[in-house]
Amino acid sequence: MQTIHYHSININKIWGITKIQQFLKHFKARDCLPDNIDNCLNNESIADVEMGPKLRAKEPPNKVNATLTNVAHFCTCVYTLLVIYLALTDTFVFFTWHPILMSIGWTLLMTEGVLALEKDNSLTKSLKTLIRWRTHWIALTIAITCILTAFFIVFLNKDYSNKPHFKTWHGLFGLIGTIAAVPTCINGIPLLWKMSLTHIVSPKIVKFVHVSSSIVALIFGGISLSLSVYTNWFTKHTKGSYVCFIYGVICVGFLTTWVLVKPFKYCFRFIKNFCVDSWNNK
């Protein structure tokens, strides 16, 4: 009996056509021929489906990326806990829900949801790819719920107080970031079934749209988050403390920058490959 070993998967050649077809069907790879099983297993499009442990050989961890990701975890926790602490140590009013939900939704869940896909993330690197993808979209779903709730809270509070809407840079950039975050989450849904939708649209196009729109949301949301340390609410609750101000600027600035690195790299690589392919096909 001859056996092909591929990581933890053993495929006996004597299984016959039926068993092999069932195996391929499990990975949504019906277009792969049974006699081409080795190529099928190494096919990057199957690994990209993320419906199980990655079939590609694991790359060695990048210590620099791992360290910077850990710093991002620290910054995320520090700023989120700081805002929650400031909110709970003063009189709790209706508006208090806005900074609490925004810090949890945008700073914590949005950041950690994106970083969950990083292979150098010490918190998720031991998890199967399927679990990391689930962590990503579940965290982002809860995050957008918190963000939209916080957005409506501040909108209603302004309306109740007869104050103008979106007159500050913090509010304006926050509006743009929130608007951009909604379609980002929506167009991320097809990625869960991108192999099944191959006959309709290329999975690479779907992913590019998802990543590029997320860049817009993260940039404007990050700027709004950075400007939050200049708001009257933050200044009042920190009593003008320069330490809290500097902590806020550094934490938000770093985590926003680091979260954007991988999406920018992906979009640049996609555009570069697209241009090269278009040039070669002329």
Image (cartoon, rainbow, N blue to C red):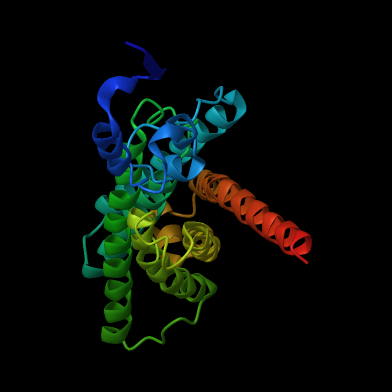
Q: Nearer the viewer, residue 280 or 227?
A: 280
Q: Nearer the viewer, residue 221 or 233?
A: 221
Asked whether, in this view, residue 88 is left or right of residue 226, the answer is left
Q: Is residue 12 visible?
A: no
Q: Furthest-top residue in view?
A: 1
Quadrant location of the C terminus in the rendered image: bottom right
Image coords of residue 176 (percent x, y): 48, 74
In the image, residue 222 above or below residue 179: above
Image coords of residue 108 (percent x, y): 37, 47
In the image, residue 71 above or below residue 84: above
Asked whether, in this view, residue 121 is left or right of residue 51, the answer is right
Total numbered circles: 0
Give residue 3's quadrant in the image.
Answer: top left
Give residue 22's quadrant in the image.
Answer: top left
Asked whether, in this view, residue 134 is left or right of residue 201, the answer is left
User: For the point 29% across and 39% down, which residue is it?
Assistant: 21
In the image, residue 34 above or below residue 271: above
Q: Nearer the viewer, residue 245 or 222?
A: 222
Quadrant location of the N terminus in the rendered image: top left
User: For the point 60% across and 51% down, which residue is it?
Assistant: 266
User: For the point 50% across and 59% down, which residue is it?
Assistant: 218
User: For the point 41% across and 84% down, which residue is it?
Assistant: 165
Image coords of residue 177 (percent x, y): 47, 68
Image coords of residue 117 (percent x, y): 43, 41
Q: Is residue 163 visible?
A: yes
Q: Nearer the viewer, residue 212 or 92?
A: 212
